[in-house]
Amino acid sequence: MLSDKRRGGVENSSGVARPALRAHFIITPYCHLHTPVSPLIEKVSEHKDFKKLLRTRTNVLVLYTKSATSGDSKLKLLSDVAQVIKGQGTIAWVNCGDLEGRKLCKKVKVDPSSKSDGADLLHYKDGTFHTEYNRPATYKSMVAFLKDPTGAPLWEENPEAKDVVHVETEKDFRKLLKREERPILMMFFVLAGMNVHPAEFDGLKQEYNVKGYPTFCYFEKGKFLHHYENYGGTAKDIADWMKNPQPPQPKAPEVQWSETDSPVFHLTDDSLDGFLEEHPSALVMFYAPWCGHCKKMKPEYDEAAEYLNKDKNSPGVLAAVDTTIHKAVGERFKISGFPTVKYFEKGEERFTLPHLRSKDKIIEFLQNPQAPPPPEQSWEDKPSSVSHLGMEDFREALKKKKHALVMFYAPWCPHCKNAVPHFTTAADLFKEDRKIAYAAVDCTKGLNQELCKQEGVEGYPMFNYYNYGKFAEKYNGERGVSDIFCRTIPQVKKKDVEVLSW
């Protein structure tokens, strides 16, 4: 166990842990080291700077060395790691061999000289000591650890997986197929085993029709025969299959909804108008057979129809139209998404009802048909100091601003909705400064999807900081007033800024 002091360096004088805040990387050049070190690795020597580092970062891996050169091999490795985890974690270095560093190491009770290689790696999470880094000192392991410090080790590091051959490159893959006499079942997946995301594996993905993960490919004597498709199979299922490998059986064609015993009235281009004249109160679901949301809604719609369509005193009936077949109906009612549910009264369209998805809601609506609540006003349509940008004006607009914080978002994303009022308030605080911009990009709109892909957006919301239009770093600080701007702009004093969090 580590002493409280070793875990320390993060408490104030009263012994109360200070709250952890995220912060961006501070770039510090190194010119005196034998090994080239990434400027993304922070050199820390004073205890106050160390406490500030842990107070302002949530995910920190610290390398302690007994001298300036004893950690050369690890520093070289960590320099490569730092490039990949930029924006997600921080790597710091403390040289316990110099005067200030020795004082710091003594305060936090770390003695790298006790290690055989004169180096010690410790991880700090949310401002406090988390764990000693005891996984393999490899690029892949360290990147995986810093991306998820509390997650499980890589698959190939699991002792129980010693019989699984993990392939790292296409060259190794080809060698394995050439030398292995026994049948091979190869699993393509996204974290360990075989990383098929890099462009170097595009050829393999195309060759073996890898379109999703996991994908299992069966080989005999170096030749691909077929896929194994029982993705939910147990160890016994896989072992039994390997004893008698068979190609995937052709799937039975999916039965059309209209051809099942569904109680829903299934309409066509020709029958819709007559049906609506005959039934003065009707809900019609416009759908596409391939639509996942439609498939999810079908059982609820069927159950509601079982109750409504067979009751003589029903307040209304349920019908459906496959608009991939009956295209005239889809064009007539301007159906652009699936499922679309519309309410008709005496043959006339009254309401479009995007909120009706469950049996209970459907029945409740027909018992008392009411107009749906007005759609929520989009963020872009609300007056604010945030600049809403798109593919056509994104780069030109940011070139004119010395500092810009851009929020990439999706309107349906709950975390984005929570962030919007705070981001808007922050923009208002800086609205008088022409050098500063708070901007937003709706990644679900048209060409913006490509823009967000170009900017590396993988989830929502994501915040990028730009300097005169050039990407500088991902912003992982408080999701209110940007701590980046507070430190970057001299005239903005911290006491003048209300930090908002959620």
Image (cartoon, grey):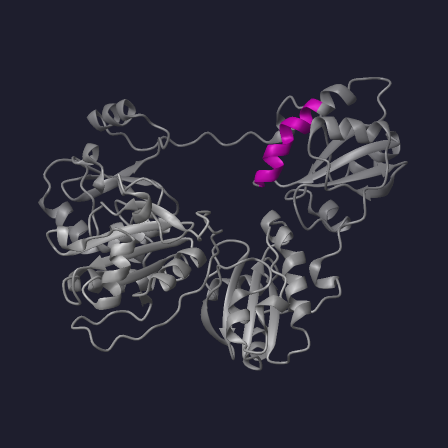
Q: How many marks?
A: 0
Q: Which residues are magenta?
A: 291-303
- Left/right placement of residue 476 relative to residue 84 reads right
Of residues 377 and 349, the one drawn nearer to the viewer in this rendering:
377
Q: Quadrant of residue 86?
A: bottom left
The answer to whether any part of residue 420 appears in the image is: yes
Does the magenta run of residues contain 295?
yes
Q: Position of residue 41 (x, y in %)?
A: 31, 65
| Residue appearing at x 63%, y 51% in the figure | 418
**Looking at the image, residue 103 lies above or below residue 311:** below
Q: Main secondary structure of the magenta part?
A: helix
Q: Quadrant of residue 162?
A: top left
Q: Position of residue 245 (x, y in %)?
A: 24, 29
Given the current orientation, which residue lies at the most extreme right position? Answer: 346
| Residue appearing at x 73%, y 51% in the figure | 331
**Looking at the image, residue 78 lies above or below residue 229:** below
| Residue appearing at x 20%, y 76% in the figure | 32
The answer to whether any part of residue 386 appears in the image is: no
Q: Position of residue 61 (x, y in %)?
A: 31, 55
Of residues 227 and 119, the one drawn nearer to the viewer in this rendering:
119
Query: Which quadrant does the N terminus fall into?
Result: top left
Q: Position of residue 407 (x, y in %)?
A: 57, 62
- Left/right placement of residue 281 relative to residue 432 reads right
Given the current orientation, which residue lies at the most extreme front position? Answer: 14
Does the magenta run of residues contain 133?
no
- Left/right placement of residue 374 relative to residue 70 reads right
Q: Quadrant of residue 305?
A: top right
